[in-house]
């Protein structure tokens, strides 16, 4: 049976994954891409394991149906709560030749070389932090590095509702950064462990103590994907090239197109899609 060829798919619960897509496209503009934002059901960060898994699996199946051989979960919450089950349990029965990759592993691989104190902070959704995925993954690669997690449940609503420049955003950024640094004053590296948070980058930099490194995931994920495709020529050949980009949302097209401008410099045209 001939293996299906198609675009690389990038999925997020909403707009956040556009911060990852932007860097992936910058590094590899030659491929075709589909972006799917499940805006109608965002946020995922406060939902149970089962719900995040169900929604993510539905999205993956939809992107497979559209021909994609390779799906990137550009969402830490979905990567933390659904990726492993999909890889181990679902892929072998759906189509063992396709791949689903996440954003946590490429981020973790980079951090061991960045911290000098061995104390790393992670800002993430309630789901990502409570899953303990970051400390567990870091332990496997860098046993001496200690991870301090801070839930930031107000960040995604601020971003999804275009309130990221408001005084309310200043208030919550300071509150969460203070709470993180109170866990250990020796934290010297902080990971933005949610793809929505780069929109708050400037405010987060102001709130962090001087000298603390702030790590954004986009370039790390893009580099890791490039490396993956170089090491897997059979997958690389299945990713179609033509520079086409398709944007899909499960909610209002108008809202998607207006808000996407914040994340992408190009104007995007979106289509609505139902997933179930
Ligand atoms: N952007 C997603 C992440 O990286 C989560 C946002 C949400 O809560 O839906 O975790």
Image (tube, rainbow, N blue to C red):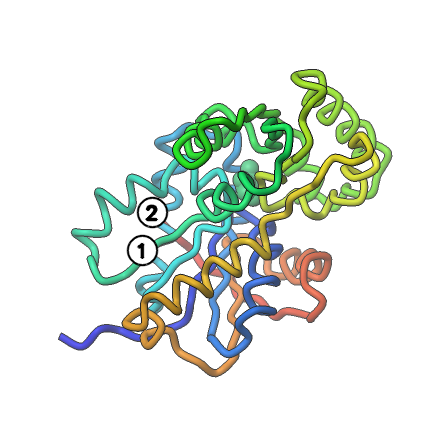
In the image, farthest residue toward the right: 167
Residue 258 position in % (x across, y down): 70, 60
**What secondary structure is marked by label 2?**
helix
Q: Residues within 10 Å of mark 2 (few under 14, many from 20)?
A: many
Residue drawn at the location 29% of the way across and 39% of the way down: 85
Q: Nearer the viewer, residue 275 or 4?
A: 4
Q: Residues within 10 Å of mark 1 (few under 14, many from 20)?
A: some
Q: Nearer the viewer, residue 189 or 38?
A: 189
Q: Is residue 94 left or right of residue 74?
A: left
The quadrant in which residue 116 appears is top right
Residue 271 position in % (x across, y down): 53, 66
Q: How many marks?
A: 2
Identify residue for label 2: 57
Residue drawn at the location 53% of the way across and 72% of the way down: 28
Q: Compared with residue 197, is residue 20 higher up or lower down, i.e. above or below?
A: below
Residue drawn at the location 64% of the way across and 69% of the way down: 268
Q: Nearer the viewer, residue 31 or 119?
A: 119
| Whole-number angstrom distance, CA of label 1 to CA of label 2 | 6 Å
Identify residue for label 1: 61
Q: Is residue 122 left or right of residue 132?
A: right
């Amino acid at each position: 049976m001939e293996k299906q060829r198609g675009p690389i798919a990038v999925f997020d619960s909403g707009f956040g994954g556009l911060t990852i897509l932007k860097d992936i496209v910058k590094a590899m503009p030659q491929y075709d891409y589909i972006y799917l934002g499940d805006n109608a059901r965002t946020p995922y960060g406060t939902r149970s394991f089962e719900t995040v898994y169900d929604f993510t699996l539905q999205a993956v199946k939809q992107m497979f149906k559209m021909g994609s051989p390779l799906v990137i979960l550009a969402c830490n919450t979905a990567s933390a709560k659904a990726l492993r089950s999909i890889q181990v349990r679902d892929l072998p029965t759906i189509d063992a030749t396709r791949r689903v990759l996440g954003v946590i592993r490429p981020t973790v691989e980079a951090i061991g070389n960045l911290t000098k104190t061995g104390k790393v902070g992670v800002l993430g959704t309630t789901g990502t932090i409570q899953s303990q995925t970051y400390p567990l993954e870091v332990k496997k690669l860098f046993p001496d590095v200690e991870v301090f997690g801070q839930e930031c449940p107000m960040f995604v609503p601020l971003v999804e509702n275009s309130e990221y420049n408001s005084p309310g955003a200043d208030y919550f950024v300071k509150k969460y950064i203070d709470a993180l640094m109170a866990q250990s004053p020796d934290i010297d590296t902080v990971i933005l462990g949610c793809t929505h948070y780069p929109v708050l980058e400037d405010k987060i930099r102001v709130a962090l103590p001087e000298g603390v490194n702030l790590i954004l995931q986009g370039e790390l994920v893009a580099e890791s994907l490039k490396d993956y495709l170089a090491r897997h020529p059979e997958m690389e050949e299945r990713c179609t090239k033509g520079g086409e980009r398709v944007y899909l949302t499960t909610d209002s097209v108008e809202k998607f197109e207006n808000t996407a401008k914040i994340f992408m410099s190009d104007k995007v045209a979106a289509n609505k899609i139902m997933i179930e």
